[in-house]
Image (spheres, helix red, strand yellow):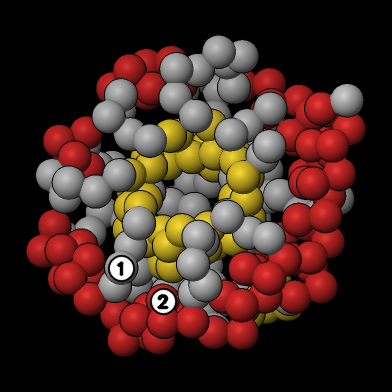
Amino acid sequence: MTRIKICGITRPEDVLAAAQCGADAIGLVFYQRSPRQVSIAQARQLAEVLPPFVSLVGLFVNAEAAFVREVMASVPLDLLQFHCDESPEYCAQFDRPYLKAIRVKSGVDLLQCASEFSGAKGLLLDAHVEGVPGGTGTAFDWALIPKQLPLPVILSGGLDEGNVAAAIKQVRPYAVDVSSGVEAGKGIKDAAKIAAFIKEVNQIDLRLSR
């Protein structure tokens, strides 16, 4: 069963839409340059409406360790997601499960990344777009992903209801991560698009399990 994370949520109604449609996790962006960024106060409000059994993920980009701790002290994050040049030592210092995002392009050795970040709960694989740490809505060549990675793969980058079934069929990831593919505008999710995306994931899972 492919898990589903809806990332870049900024509004309570989008938290509820994602949860009601069956998302396993939602992602909050703590990166000032992102149009989907939330403040600590906003994040606390979003966490308050999150139903039980849906994981809350905090996304950081080369953040000061003190800022990560400040967020963790106020927001009940289940998982941290590091999206740029963070070292394994940096990621491990918070004593919280984490994902390491890797921007994939030809020449990036994902087996080496998995070895380097062996303490991560998974590798989140995103498109490499120069100068942008993520959230570009751009897909990458899924053939660059080795068949056997020793860490769970969370597939991201340009996914939407039109291509997520093909992505799951080819990659067989542990989870898929979507942001712009279910939006009406940057940071504004579309409940119908969320529902359609999750329906596609569930249908391909059902077909592959037969």
Q: Determine which residue is flagged by label 1.
A: 76
Q: Determine which residue is flagged by label 2.
A: 47
Q: Residues within 10 Å of mark 2 (few under 14, many from 20)?
A: some
Q: Are marks 2 and 1 in contact (CB under 8 Å)?
A: yes
Q: Which badge, 2 or 1, is on the more N-terminal residue?
A: 2
Residue 27 appears in the figure: no
Q: Residues within 10 Å of mark 1 (few under 14, many from 20)?
A: some
Left or right position of 43 against 210: left
Secondary structure beneath disc 2?
helix
Residue 71 appears in the figure: yes
**Residue 137 placement (x, y as % from top left):** 65, 55
**Residue 141 placement (x, y as % from top left):** 68, 30
Q: Amino acid at mark 2?
A: Ala
Closer to the camera, 11 or 209? 209
Closer to the camera, 47 or 85? 47
Q: Amino acid at mark 1?
A: Pro
Left or right position of 185 against 114: right
Q: What residue is shown at x 58% (from left), y 55% (from top)?
A: 24
**Residue 200 placement (x, y as % from top left):** 83, 49
Q: What residue is shown at x 22% (from left), y 33% (from top)?
A: 88
Which quadrant would the C terminus be assigned to in this image? top right
Q: What residue is shown at x 75% (from left), y 75% (from top)?
A: 191
Left or right position of 143 against 119: right
Secondary structure beneath disc 1?
loop
Instruction: Tell me the quarter of the picture where residue 197 sits.
Output: bottom right
Location of residue 155 with respect to 10 vertically, above or below: above
Question: Alpha-carbon distance for marks 2 and 1?
Answer: 7 Å
Q: What residue is shown at x 33% (from left), y 62% (from top)?
A: 77
Left or right position of 185 against 103: right
